[in-house]
Image (cartoon, rainbow, N blue to C red):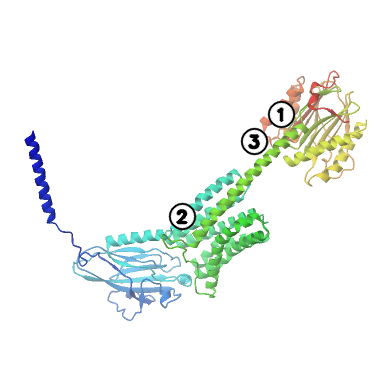
């Protein structure tokens, strides 16, 4: 065992010695720049150039020695051919070494269409020829057939470029980037690298677009939470439209969408974004949508169709762009002027929005002024703001930068606004709860028996506070005044007026007389004269009032209120008691009238407001008085509380409650009883 282990150690040491000796004889690799160079050559330099068009210029034997020389990496507008539109040719040669290999050519960006000829044969093309739809910022690589022989040779390259005259005064013509010729594999790598660099130059734009989309969706959620506050909707639409606009701009620069389609959609989206901005600022700044506002909004419709001016060669692209700019410029001016006016008035919202909005709309405003002055020939410095704020580690243009600031500033503004609104809602909810508690005191359920009558009433507001009123008052002569009032509308405003009506009725009854007819007429008349001074002009109240004498004689009046239903126990029939008169507080009335009626023991009177009578089902059919009459005939001997609950339940099951629901039931008792034990609830109180 020991001998075997010793042998293994000796073998391992011998192997290690051999490896060390072999390694000492190896040498590092030698790199040769003459034989190891990559087969790629830059084509940046001087190319032959000539305006015009002649198919013979593609022939490799054509003598172009008299043609002028232009740099291949700069547009021809900067080299003596400013605003030239039409055909133009480039020519140059490429000498390749011996050896058969696949060759390709990579041509830099050109804002036009062109055809590539190699040794007189068409090798490829990009973009349309002889129309106005040519505009691209993308470079292209074209494969060239491999050499037939392994000997060195020369390729004769000719490029036929077309720059539409309608574009000539708006964008320059010709190549303006680096071009290469070389091995197809290496050219493909160069093309991929160039495309990555192009995407890197757009990183600020698509980051801004993604941010705008995400924030826009968040604001949409806020809108669905608070649909009555339309500023969330308009801001969300503004952000989403801006994101779509940026996406279209990226697609245009990468030549992914035909230019006229891209321009038309982009013009429509930009107009939609500015309209959303107009609507947003009109809401948050409380600026009325005047004729000027609507005129500015209508001008936005001019922007999208201007694309057809150059598509159909009606005008140049520059003129079309000028008209589009003039169409949208008033919207920017309206926003900035309105914001500045509100800020000078020390409006808090305007002061918060001032700086981010000036940045957001300021750069487009400057860009528009540059384009207008360029087209009018007032300056030749720049037609657009194309100066980046940063070039490293990525390109950052002013538009996405100030747009991002605007998004975050407006998002904080809306979150602050949302928070304040929630606090206000909490405060109002607390106040409404207090008002609801007060209303329960003002309009308690009625359940009492007095002077030979059983009375039962209930009011159910559709909101926290309602405008319906049911009340019963014991008069000094032991008669009873029972009435139902319905203030137009519902909610807090109607509830306040309802409280005023009850107070006014109680005050008027302090001066009551024994004549029930005069009492009801005086009550309606004095209410009709008093209400206009304490209500909005569009508000009014309907009233149904009954004066009940102990001997069964009643006096009733209706002021715009639905009919009183009168159930006669002896015949088990229901009759509608009507009295057509104007509601209280609507218009002046010469005199209100009333009617009298003798009711017998077991007879029943039912007064319901329109919240019960007009409850509608899905077929828009109303509950109506007939269904109440049917219930009265079906439940003649039951207690009033059961009848009341049956009517209310039937109405609510028939259709959703959309208005305050109030009902009052009065039955002539079979024997005279005193005040019920429920009088402690305050359901019947003496007038004085």
Give the SS element for disc 1.
Answer: helix
| Position of residue 433 in the picture relative to residue 562 (left or right) | left
| Position of residue 143 in the picture relative to residue 234 (left or right) | left
For marks 1 and 2, the one nearer the N-term is 2
Q: Is residue 178 above or below residue 22?
A: below
Of all residues shown, which one is farthest toward the right?
A: 514
* Dots 1, 2 in contact, CB < 8 A: no
Q: CA distance from mark 1 to mark 2?
A: 59 Å
Residue at image location 39% in from the left, 61% down from the top? 198
Q: Is residue 570 above or below residue 140?
A: above
For marks 3 and 2, the one nearer the N-term is 2
| Position of residue 559 in the picture relative to residue 258 (left or right) | right
Which is more toward the observer, 444 or 516? 444
Give the SS element for disc 2.
Answer: helix
Which is more toward the observer, 385 or 346? 346
Q: CA distance from mark 1 to mark 3?
A: 18 Å
Q: Nearer the viewer, mark 1 or mark 3?
A: 1
Residue 40 screen position, x and y as percent = 27, 66
* Dots 3, 2 in contact, CB < 8 A: no
Q: Which mark is residue 648?
A: 1
Q: Which residue is mark 2?
A: 207
Badge 1, how many Cα within 10 Å: few under 14, some, many 20+? Answer: many
Residue 170 screen position, x and y as percent = 48, 70
Q: Which residue is mark 3?
A: 618
Residue 247 screen position, x and y as percent = 47, 56
Residue at image location 60% in from the left, 56% down from the top? 353
């Amino acid at each position: 065992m020991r001998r075997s282990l010793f042998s293994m150690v000796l073998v391992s040491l011998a192997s290690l010695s051999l490896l060390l000796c072999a390694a000492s004889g190896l040498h590092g690799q030698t790199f040769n720049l003459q034989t190891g160079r990559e087969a790629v050559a830059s084509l940046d330099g001087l190319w032959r150039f000539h305006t015009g068009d002649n198919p013979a210029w593609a022939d490799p034997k054509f003598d172009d020695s008299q043609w002028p020389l232009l740099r291949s990496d700069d547009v021809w507008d900067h080299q003596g051919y400013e605003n030239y539109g039409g055909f133009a040719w480039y020519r140059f040669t490429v000498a390749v070494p011996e050896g058969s290999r696949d060759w390709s050519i990579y041509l830099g960006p050109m804002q036009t269409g062109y055809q590539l000829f190699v040794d007189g044969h068409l090798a490829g093309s990009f973009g349309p020829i002889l129309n106005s739809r040519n505009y691209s910022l993308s470079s292209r690589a074209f494969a060239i057939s491999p050499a037939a022989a392994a000997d060195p040779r020369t390729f004769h390259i000719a490029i036929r470029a077309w720059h539409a005259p309608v574009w000539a005064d708006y964008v320059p013509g010709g190549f303006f980037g680096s071009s290469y010729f070389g091995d197809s594999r290496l050219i493909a790598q160069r093309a991929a690298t160039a495309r990555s660099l192009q995407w890197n130059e757009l990183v600020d734009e698509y980051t801004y677009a993604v941010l705008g989309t995400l924030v826009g969706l968040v604001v949409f959620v806020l809108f669905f939470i608070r649909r009555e506050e339309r500023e969330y909707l308009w801001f969300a639409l503004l952000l989403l439209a801006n994101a779509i606009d940026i996406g279209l701009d990226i697609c245009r620069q990468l030549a992914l969408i035909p230019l006229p389609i891209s321009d038309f959609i982009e013009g429509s989206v930009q107009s939609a974004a500015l309209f959303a901005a107009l609507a947003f600022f009109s809401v948050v700044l409380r600026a009325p949508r005047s004729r000027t506002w609507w005129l500015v909004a209508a001008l936005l419709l001019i922007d999208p169709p201007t694309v057809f001016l150059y598509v159909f060669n009606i005008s140049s692209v520059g003129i079309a762009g000028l008209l589009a700019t003039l169409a949208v410029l008033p919207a920017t001016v309206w926003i900035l002027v309105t914001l500045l006016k509100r800020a000078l008035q020390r409006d808090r919202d305007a002061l918060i929005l001032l700086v981010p909005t000036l940045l957001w709309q300021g750069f487009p405003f400057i860009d528009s002024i540059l384009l207008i002055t360029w087209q009018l020939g007032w300056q030749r410095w720049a037609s657009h703001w194309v100066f980046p704020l940063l070039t490293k580690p990525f390109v950052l243009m002013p538009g996405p930068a100030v747009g991002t600031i605007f998004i975050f500033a407006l998002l904080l503004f809306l979150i602050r606004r949302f928070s304040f609104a929630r606090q206000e809602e909490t405060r109002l909810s607390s106040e409404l709860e207090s008002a609801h508690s007060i209303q329960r005191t003002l309009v308690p359920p009625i359940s009492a028996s007095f002077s030979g009558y059983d009375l039962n009433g209930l009011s159910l507001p559709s909101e926290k506070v309602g405008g319906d009123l049911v009340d019963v008052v014991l008069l000094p002569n032991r008669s009873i005044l029972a009435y139902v009032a319905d203030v137009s509308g519902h909610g807090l405003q109607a509830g306040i007026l309802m409280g005023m009506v009850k107070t006014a009725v109680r005050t008027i009854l302090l001066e009551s007389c024994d004549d029930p007819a005069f009492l009801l007429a005086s009550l309606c008349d004095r209410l009709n004269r008093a209400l206009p001074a304490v209500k909005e002009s569009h508000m009014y109240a309907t009233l149904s009032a009954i004066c009940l004498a102990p001997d069964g004689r009643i006096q009733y009046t209706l002021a715009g209120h639905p009919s009183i239903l009168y159930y006669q126990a002896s015949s088990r029939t229901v009759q509608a008691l009507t009295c057509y008169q104007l509601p209280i507080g609507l218009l002046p009335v010469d005199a209100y009238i009333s009617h009298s009626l003798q009711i017998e023991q077991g007879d029943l009177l039912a007064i319901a407001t329109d919240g019960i009578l007009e409850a509608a089902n899905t077929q828009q059919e109303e509950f109506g008085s007939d269904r109440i009459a049917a219930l009265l005939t079906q439940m003649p001997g039951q207690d009033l509380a059961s009848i009341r609950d049956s009517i209310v339940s039937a109405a609510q099951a028939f259709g959703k409650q959309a208005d305050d629901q109030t009902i009052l039931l009065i039955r002539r008792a079979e024997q005279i009883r005193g005040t019920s034990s429920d009088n402690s609830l305050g359901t019947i109180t003496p007038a004085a």
